[in-house]
């Protein structure tokens, strides 16, 4: 197993609590089913730089000073970012959004054809 897929011991209790809350399972190892395809984690750092991880979730430490991001394909990453620097984003398809305008019917978004004079 890749070292990027072995959860550090200090984060195992937090991961276990997260999986209990989100999956209803008591374990400290990850599976592909733990990742949502529509979920991404966006981190913002003090200098204004940022990182974006797709197919990921984040867990904060108890002090709120560090964050671990677990990704489906790229292992885990620990950052010195508190809660104010972590944003969980979910992709919503236009059809699923109650505020989405209906898609134009075929040809509706085309300008009218010129007329002959």
Image (spheres, rainbow, N blue to C red):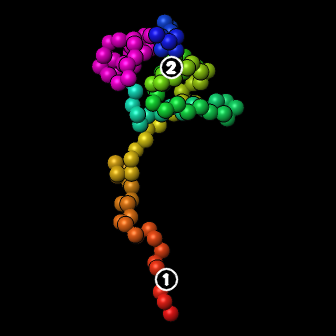
Q: Residue 99, can we see it?
A: yes
Residue depicted at 40% across the width and 70% down the height: 108
Is residue 97 rendered to the left or right of residue 77?
A: left
The local secondary structure at tag 1 comes to loop
Q: Where is residue 78 in the image (x, y as percent from the top left)?
A: 57, 18
- Taking the view exactly as shown, the residue that stands out farthest to the right is 47
Q: Which mark is residue 75?
A: 2
Tag 2: Cα neighbours inside 10 Å, few (<14), some, or many (≥20)?
Answer: some
Residue depicted at 45% across the width and 30% down the height: 55
For the residues carrying marks 1 and 2, which lies nearer the camera in this image? 1
Magenta span of residues:
12-33
**Circle 1 residue:** 114
Residue depicted at 29% across the width and 19% down the height: 24
Q: Nearer the viewer, residue 42 or 83?
A: 42
Q: Where is residue 65 in the image (x, y as percent from the top left)?
A: 58, 19
Residue depicted at 38% across the width and 60% down the height: 103
Q: N-terminal of the two: label 1 or label 2?
A: 2
- Taking the view exactly as shown, the residue that stands out farthest to the top is 9
Q: Does the magenta run of residues contain 68? A: no
Against 52, is 19 above or below? above
Is residue 13 rendered to the left or right of residue 47?
A: left
Is residue 55 rendered to the left or right of residue 81?
A: left
């Amino acid at each position: 197993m890749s070292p990027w897929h072995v959860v550090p011991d200090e984060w195992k209790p937090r991961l276990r609590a997260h999986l209990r809350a989100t999956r209803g399972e008591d374990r400290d190892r990850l599976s592909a089913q733990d990742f949502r395809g529509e979920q991404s984690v966006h981190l913002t750092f003090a200098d204004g730089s940022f990182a974006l991880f797709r197919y990921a979730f984040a867990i904060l430490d108890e002090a709120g000073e560090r964050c671990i991001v677990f990704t489906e394909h790229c292992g885990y990453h620990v950052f010195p970012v508190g809660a104010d620097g972590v944003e969980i984003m979910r992709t919503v398809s236009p059809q699923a959004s109650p505020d989405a305008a209906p898609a134009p019917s075929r040809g509706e978004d085309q300008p009218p054809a010129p007329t002959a004079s």
